[in-house]
Image (tube, rainbow, N blue to C red):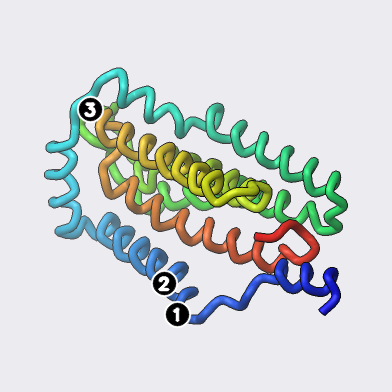
Amino acid sequence: MPIAAHAHQERTPSREHPGTLVALLGLPALLFALITWQVVADGPLLRLDERLSRVLLDPDRFSELLSDLGNVGVAVPVLAVALGYAAVRGRRDGTGRWWPPVAAAALLMVLVPALVVPLKELTDRPGPPVVPSGTGYYPSGHTATAAVAYGGATLLLLPWLRTAQARRALITVCAALVLGVSYGLVRRGYHWPLDVVGSWCLCAVLLTSLWLFLRRTARGGPPR
């Protein structure tokens, strides 16, 4: 087999098993629908959520700093840097299809408020007792911003890392940032736990969709 053909074959993504797609897309979508239904219907799951919030609630400066990592002004610039790096590397390496992954990750970030804001209006959930009175706390926008910004940056950068250790380190940092934001929001009392879990489920669908798109556009790019 010619070297060029062999390299192209290595770079061609394998087809995803239907069971894998169901697990990665269907399960979080189902959980999100279930949680949203409980929030709208004021179901019994909310009683457990409120009790868990009382156990975890302990506002302090550290939890506030962690929650700030989900601010648009913090998370989105991180994604912007990853977008720029992926674009520059793709063009410099002669990758003909360098722009679709960059555009897709940017579009996904734009979709976050377009999805989260109507959901907040629909569910109209009050916040925890320590925040000012009001509604629109479900799902957590800070959690969604952090998950899509840091997760999208990770998916863009992974193909350009040469070693498995570097890739594992990047994934670990991404997970730590998202979990840190989530913990800070609940600990500080900015959100109920279910607000955060609902955002996890929503963003799992969004990031899995991005991952599948990146696999399908990986032909002609670096091995993924």
Q: Residue at 36% of width from left, 41% of height from top?
A: 179
Mark number displayed over residue 130: 3
Callout in the foreground (3, 2): 2
Which residue position holds label 2? 23
Residue 42 falls left or right of residue 165: left
The three-letter code of the residue at mark 1 reads Gly
Quick one: SS at disc 1? Answer: helix
Cβ–Cβ under 8 Å for marks 1 and 2:
yes
Q: Residue at x 83, y 55 (%)?
A: 95
Q: Image point 42% across, 48% down: which residue?
A: 121
Q: Amino acid at mark 2?
A: Ala
Q: Earlier in the sequence, mark 3 or mark 2?
A: 2
Q: How many numbered dots are placed on residues in this image?
A: 3
Check residue 19 in the rendering and tell me which mark sits there, or answer none: 1
Quadrant location of the N terminus?
bottom right
Nearer-N-terminus badge (1/3): 1
Secondary element at tag 2: helix
Q: Alpha carbon of mark 3 to alpha carbon of mark 2: how far?
A: 37 Å
Q: Position of residue 169 (x, y in %)?
A: 49, 42
Circle 2 residues within 10 Å: few <14, some 14–19, many ≥20: few
Q: Quadrant of the C terminus?
A: bottom right
Residue 185 image offset from top left, x and y in percent: 32, 34
Left or right, 132 with reference to 142: left
State the SS at label 3: loop
How far apart are the alpha carbons under marks 1 and 2? Answer: 6 Å
User: Is there any visible trace of residue 113 in the rendered image?
Assistant: no
- Give the residue type at disc 3: Val
> Up-down: is 61 above or below 10?
above
Q: Neighbour class for label 1 at 10 Å: few (<14), some, many (≥20)? A: few
Please provide percent x and percent y for residue 51: 12, 44
